[in-house]
Amino acid sequence: MNAPIPELRTRDSAVPENAFEVALTDGPLQTEGNGMPVLELLAALDRYQHLRDISHRERFGTPDPRCREALLELARLRQALRDIGAASAATGGELHIEASLNLRMLPRQA
C-alpha cells in the first residue's frame, strides 16, 4: 500500500480535458490485510455526508436530500461489499480490491 501513486492519466482519450483516473494502488489489495484503507475511505465518506446533512438541517431546518441519497448509496455499497466478501469466503476464492480515483468534469446543473 505504500507504493508511489502513479501519475495522473487521462481515462478517455476522446475527452482528455475532463476525465482522469488516478490509480491508488499499483496492484490489487488483499482484503485480509490491506483492504482497510478502502473501508476507511467509505467510513470517511459516510462521516462527511452526515456532517453535510447536519449542517443543512441547522441552516434550513430540513434534511439535505442529496446527502440522504448519498448515505443510502454508501449503505448499499457496504452491503454489496459484505455480500461479495461472504461469497468469496464461501467458495474459497480470493477477493482483491483494485482502487482508483476517477475524476470527471460535468456541466453545472441549474
Image (cartoon, helix red, strand yellow):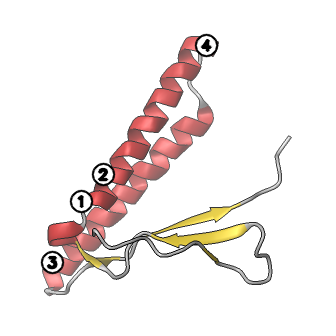
Residue at mark 4: 59
Q: Viewed as shown, does residue 104 lie left or right of 31? A: right
Q: Viewed as shown, does residue 103 lie left or right of 84? A: right
Dot 1 amino acid type: Met
Residue at mark 3: 89
Pair 3/2: label in front? 2
Residue at mark 2: 40
Q: Residue at x 42, y 69 (%)?
A: 24
Q: Viewed as shown, does residue 70 lie left or right of 81? A: right
Using the numbered discs, state the Cα–Cα distance from disc 4 to disc 2 in whole angstroms. 29 Å
Q: Residue at x 43, y 45 (%)?
A: 45
Secondary structure at badge 1 equals helix
Q: Residues within 10 Å of mark 4 (few under 14, many from 20)?
A: few
Using the numbered discs, state the Cα–Cα distance from disc 1 to disc 3 in whole angstroms. 17 Å
Q: Which badge, 4 or 2, is on the more N-terminal residue?
A: 2
Dot 4 amino acid type: Arg
Quadrant where the C terminus sits is top right
